[in-house]
Image (cartoon, rainbow, N blue to C red):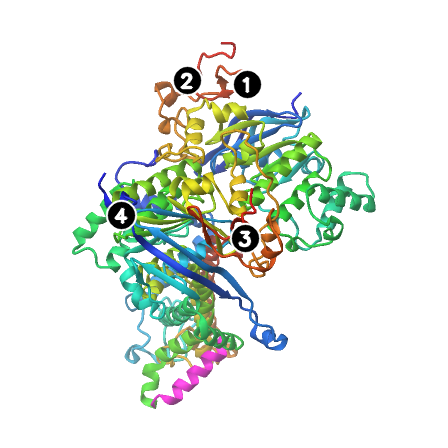
Amino acid sequence: MTDPYQDPLTSSPLLEVRDLSKYFALSSRWLSRIFTRQPRPVLKAIDGLSFQILRGQTFGLVGESGCGKSTVARVIVGLYAPTRGEILFEGQFVNQRNHRFSRASLHSRMQMIFQDPYASLDTRWRVRDIIAEPIRAFKLAQSRAALRNRVAELLLQVGLSPSDGGKYPHEFSGGQRQRISIARAISSNPDFLVCDEPTSALDVSVQAQILNLIKELQRRLGLTYLFISHNLAVVHHISDHVGVMYLGRLCEVAPKRILFSQPQHPYTRMLLDTIPDLSLTGRKRQPVTGEVPNPINPPSGCPFHPRCPVTNERCQVEQPHPGASGESMVACHAVEENRLQ
Amino acid sequence: MALLEVDRLRIEFPTRRGVLVAVDDISFSIDQGEVLGVVGESGAGKSITGAAIIGLLEPPGQIAHGTIRLQGQQINGLPNEAMRRIRGAKIGVIFQDPLTSLNPLYTIGRQLVQTITTHTDLTTSQARDRAIDLLNEVGIPAAKRRIDSYPHEFSGGMRQRVVIALALCAKPGLIIADEPTTALDVSIQAQIISLLRRLCQEHRTAIMLITHDMGVIAETADRVAVMYAGRIAEIGPLRDVVKNPKHPYTVGLMDSIPVIEEENDELAHIKGAMPGLQEIPLGCSFNPRCPDAFDQCRRERPDLMPTGNPNQVAACWKYDGTTNND
Amino acid sequence: MTINRTSGRKGGFGHWVRQVADHDVFYSFTRSPVTMLAAFTTFVIVFASIFAPWLTPHDPFNPASLDLMEAFTPPVWLEDGTWKYPLGTDDQGRDILSTIMFGNRISLIVGFFAVLLSMLIGITLGTVSGYVGGWFDVVTMRLADAQLTVPPILIALLVDGVARTTLPRELQEEMAIYVLIFSIGIAAWPQYARVTRSGAMVERNKEYIAAARIIGIHPVRIMLGHIVPNVMGPTLVMATIGVALAIIIEATLSFLGVGVPPTTPSLGTLIRIGNDFLFSGEWWITIFPAVALVVLVLSVNLIGDWLRDTFNPKLR
């Protein structure tokens, strides 16, 4: 138990984002734009996010659809260039200006697992070629035999058999495809994996298998995860720290146990009240109201204020900024002013 | 007498490589005002069962044998026109995707009024008043104004409320809800669930709630039927099935769901995956994944049998010889 | 992992045969007698064309073997007909059956390679347009739109005409077939480009492409390795119908006298030659090549239709 990855005292942030933002310019026809003289509408998919992920730990990101959590994943792995802000990997800036160039060294160390087990594998490739794609790209195998052995080893590692390598993706069930996807992600020996809703397309009994596999690989390979999900129970199960997102912003970041036992932000509290009461404890819950507003036209001030039970005038005009509150970071005027409870 | 009785229903899909049995001899009933949750993984046959009850089985699917009775009257095998009347008047339907359940070209008011006048004797203006009442009841704010809006002007959650209003138009005794909350966000899901529960209590409407999400069932259902590979593995009252499942599949299913109250490093899980329709094993269809399987399980298919709990039955040889009087 | 994974040896010829016989495409083929007939006819024609030099009773291109005395011999079942020339001879005494077999050969070669060229241009431009987008996409697609407003036959005529005038006279006959392939191929690329582009735009947003991009695979390799194989399907179906179309365009051009020269006649050239004698009683010179053309085009087209229906039931 002297594994340094497991010891929180020696943990340092592997990944840190500062003030990360990604805006999408929505295309309207330039001709009508010229005639109406309206500015191009902008979707602020993520707006001023800051958090860090400790080495060997899992950072869970929860939120409802449209809150921008998938955009966070895609910006971090470099599929989108951020509009503003910085990403630091092992304390080094991931240079935005020369995005592609500086990314090259990072590619093998940062991989991603996707949501849809049917779209994430090229159906025309054999499983062994899918898994070997990163190994070939980074020239990690010296010979054909070494490559074959490595693929077989990876297949075993994710609970498949080496003979599955000769098959095509359509011969596998959703859960097995997700295993193949995981094998591809870990084939370049990455340190950091972004998991974007990896189990939400799976049935529960299979979800449990995949969650166990993800945890087991973390233990065995010392991986660090950014785990994105809309399912609070899943995030609770897998994460060490949790961030709650609403309309492109982080409402609350806290160690898992604290977030689930002492939620502070009103949105976090509301989300926790939506968790189905599977233990049939009959615990009292606040009825949930309202819907997520259109992110193109978000409310002024705190984006949550129209649904918030403790809102006041300040919330309607002034955007709250994350501030420390106990062990948590909370972006809420009410928490700051101690108006809660 | 039960409101809906399904007796030894078997649904087959003839293909050129042989007949696929999607639903295999299932029997259950729903009482008036009761919510029966039907839970199972994708491909377990739960949606097909729902479609068969409302007479909307996609060809080549067909009912091979068995009966479906509504208020004692057999409704399977009825001519299309008769079935269409029953579908609107006696059975309401809520599907997963609210966008496809509504016609995008008509205002929701027009769709509601049309449904109401088809199935009741109300005049158009009375029907409009009733439509506004319904929209109020399902929680659409400013119903009087919103009634003339088109489906696309509503958000996903609001649309699903409209679909529920549509299903309630003719005050049916039974609503078949097929994954009504799956396409919705968690916060909206919770609202729709509590709406369904409230309506069910107020109108004494029975609901057959089909979902893959045990959480939704736990929040809504009175009784639960667990389906696996075209068969019912277990039926019983919600509390008994959730707290004290009898069938090994239900046990594994409940254990594999992560819960906040518990802190464990590893989730229990069932090994393997549910077999496809063309590869259902001999004997009990769960036997290759079952930790308790013995010889009989690999040879003979178990029927629902008593488990010692008077209301809970399970299709498992473990309970062979058990009686409910023990 | 799964329970019902069939064990036992996979692979081997027997396995392959069983797989083909069990496949839905093969099944739908056996259920469509028209398609089977069309496939059989196409096979016979292709076979006869490939082996024409060995199968034909006469060599129609060897002037030494031609006998002008035997010109205008009618088909065998008419008076003066002889088994030596089952379908009669033309004005120069060439055996009609042999010239049709050689004519088919040229028609098929031009049809096949013209479509290949269209696909090469269309798939390349379409994939880059769909995957990269931006100004390249705008330019390419406007170009395609512009070309689609003009019938392909006019484009082919235009390209053909320009190519002919720029070539030196002595090369014209030799190069005629390449000019034909080029002009017909140029005429048909926009439809392939459009289909490929829309396919590429769908694939581009799928997660396996994201996975390849995260690994840092070069865009060209992503397009060649992932996008093209996944969008090829519909274009192959189109290509079959395209072959029939290309054959018709070739026949039309040759009929108009701007195709292959009369010394190595294609079906269109044969029809043109015969056309002069249609009303003087020697109808067989033009009718038999015309029938051969109809049968060939119809067969290829029927196969194309069947492929389209089988692979894309929505288009039916």
Among the two numbered marks 3 and 4 on one chain, the one whose residue lies closer to the N terminus: 4
Between the C-alphas of marks 2 and 4, the distance is: 52 Å
Which numbered mark, 2 or 3, is in the foreground of this view? 3
Residue identified by numbered label 4: A10
Q: Amino acid at mark 3?
A: His
> Between tags 1 and 4, which lies in front?
4
What is the chain identity of the residue bearing mark 1? B
Q: Main secondary structure of the magenta part?
A: helix
Picture coordinates of residue A23, whole percent (x, y)? 48, 64
Q: How many marks?
A: 4
Same chain, labels 3 and 4: yes
Do labels 3 and 4 touch, CB within 8 Å? Answer: no
Mark 1 secondary-structure assignment: loop
Front tag of 1 and 3:
3
Magenta range is C152-168
Mark yes or no: residue A82 visible: no
Q: In screen coordinates, is C146 left or right of B92?
A: left
Q: Quadrant of residue C238?
A: bottom left
Q: Nearer the viewer, mark 3 or mark 4?
A: 3
Distance from disc 3 to disc 4, alpha carbons, whole Å, reads: 34 Å
Q: Amino acid at mark 1?
A: Asn
Q: Which residue is mark 3?
A: A333
Neighbor class of circle 2 (other Cα within 10 Å; few <14, some 14-19, many 20+) is: some
Chain of residue at mark 4? A
Q: Gap between marks 2 and 1, in whole Å?
A: 17 Å
Depth order, front residue of B22/B174 = B174
Residue at the spot 27% in from the left edge and 57% down from the top edge: A108
Marks 2, 1: nearer the viewer? 1
Q: Which mark is residue B311?
A: 1
Find the distance from the CA under tag 2 to the CA under tag 3: 58 Å
Badge 3 element = helix
In 3D space, how far apart are the residues under numbered discs 1 and 4 (Cα atoms)? 56 Å
